[in-house]
Amino acid sequence: MPLRLAFLLLFVALGCRPTAPVTSPVRARTPASDVATIDEHSHARPDDVVVRHFGLLLDVDFATRTLGGVITIAVQRHDLRELLRLDTSALDISKVEVGRSPAAFAIGTTRLADFEADWHPTTWSTTPLGDGLGAGLDVALGGDVDLVRITYRTTASASGLQWLGPEQTGDGKAPFLYSQSQAVHARSWFPCQDSPGIRTTYDAIVKTPVGVRALMSADPIPSTTGAQAFEMRLPVPAYLVAIAVGHLEFAAIGPRTGVWAEPSMLARATAEFADIERMLAVIEALYGPYRWGRYDVLVLPPAFPFGGMENPKLTFATPTIIAGDRSLVSLIAHELAHSWSGNLVTNATWADLWLNEGFTVYIERRIIEALFGRERADMDAVLGQQDLDEAFAELGDDDERLRLQLGGRNPDDALSDVQYEKGALLLLALEQAYGRERFDPFVLAWFEQHAFGSVTTKQFEAFAAKHLFDTAPLPGHTPIDLGVWLDRPALPKDTPVPHAAAFDRVDAVVAQFVAGKLVAKTLETKDWAPQQWLHFLRALPKGIGAAKLKALDGRFALTTSGNAEIRAQWLEVCVREGHRSTDASLDEFLRTIGRRKFVMPLYKALLAADRGDDARRIYARVRAGYHPITQASIDELLGPPAPPPTAAP
């Protein structure tokens, strides 16, 4: 059918009704595929009352480092007796009002950010949720109410926001703000039903100081107020709502792709990400059209705690992937792949995260293979297997399963390479068992039949039984037992074993170097890819000694490498081996980089090397520059820094 008609039918199925007024609330239930099972990390009860659209009016105040907010929410009520239940965290709520939409009101065509209705105060209360989940907000509705307006302000405890002074940015000219809403941090900057199983459209008006620009994971739209306005017409979960404010400029890459960055970073980032249009073409050929309109990348300051965040239309990315040779753009391939796995089809709860990340890693490597060859994809797969082995060494049995049990836990605590790498290996096992000729159409059908929906692992099992397991695997292959993959720890015995011939050559060099048959000055590495360097550094055994490391650094300048992956791995080896001449570089790296993938192993290495005092000294000095998510992880590892001594009166 025509794409526009398909979208209209989809919105009607979701209850958004983009072309018809909202009618009086009814008790009719939403289709089961639209509302997830109860999410233990959210106070929301969408079977009773569900958010269908919201409008945000935000005032960015860098002086107080707060957002002044008004959120107007359109709800669909399935049970007129029930409250609207929302999630919040550390929000200062000053007023809650309710109203009734007029006859001409239509979700998807009426902007709510500055919508005026006949508002009336209502009763509301909060309930602590525990374990870093904030507080539930219960709003009394009554009568034929279908609109709620909440006036609030964020606080210094907002875990989903990081405020940076000009000195913490690349250009040093203006302050910077950005959000990180995954997994349950959206609730810290706007009241919402903060579950990946609940999708909604939204619009926003953002007021900013002069000299900075606001961006959101939405389309910019005209505004007559002097503020910047945005709208997202496709339904997304709350964790994919994002905002950034800073001194930013834009450069186009292709007709539907581009880069936002601080001016000093823009040219480098544009050159590094030149393959994005080609990446899009690869995925579309495999898994159907890109449905989000534009795909832009925002390069954030280095304090960003993750490699990237797949906010629809606007991926947030760390500057640590800009190496000058496009060697680390697999991260961009990963975030782009999320436009299908994660954004288009979302895990219904955080226990189902592998459906998001496992699919994405698998697709990422298909992109890398198509653009840069099988050898590079194989190297990435082997490095991923090494990361998974390391995760297994640290995790308990419960967290080695793909179908997680997260009762009583914050979902951030369960995020590991298991969901990424074990999930990707499961999909690789299915591909090898049934062949790409069957598996690729299976994945395409998965995305098309669940587009703009949220899914559970149980749904995937049923879908695979109907659309993949209905025929025998290829000759020489046995059927895949999903139950073993999903619910047992470690890896099944028949797991595919990634192998990279390029690493065999590196292993031979390592053996000779360790045995003294090769010295640093005779190592021939001019044709090595960065992945080979990473494998080399990971393969250096304990006890290699500071002398050999000094010789390597003298030949290859690893301490000052412009590739953040190589430099971080090198510094970790040096800490382990007691090579203290790199301490200044270590100190500078931990001060300027906030990506958890890099800083957590380095702090762990300092502890393992009996240098806990050094770790705490460095952390106490740099902690303020880390994102709250990074702070929470390192606080748990090292303990929060002691407060400074109080001056004597």
Image (cartoon, rainbow, N blue to C red):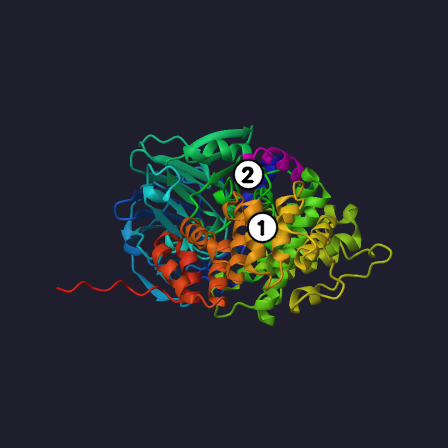
Q: Where is residue 20 in the image (x, y as percent from the top left)?
A: 48, 40
Q: Residue 292 carries which label?
A: 2
Question: Are there few (<14), some (14-19), or many (20+) residues within 10 Å of tag 2?
Answer: some
Q: Residue 163 carries which label?
A: none
- Is 607 contained in the magenta span? no
Question: Can you see residue 230?
Answer: yes
Kind of residue at disc 2? Trp
Does label 2 or label 1 sit earlier along the sequence? Answer: 2
- What residue is shown with label 1? 552
Q: Position of residue 498 (x, y in %)?
A: 72, 55
Residue under the point 76% across and 54% down: 468
Q: Which of 465 and 139 is in front in this view?
A: 465
Q: Nearer the viewer, residue 435 or 380?
A: 380
Furthest toward the left, the residue is: 649
**Residue 538 against residue 254 in the figure, above or below:** below
- In the figure, residue 636 lies in which quadrant? bottom left
Question: Can you see residue 467?
Answer: no
Furthest toward the right, the residue is: 475
Question: Which label sits in the foreground, 2 or 1?
Answer: 1
Main SS, magenta residues? helix
Q: Is mark 2 on a helix, strand or loop?
A: loop
Residue under the point 58% across and 41% down: 329
- Report the magenta residues as a range: 272-285
Kind of residue at disc 1? Leu
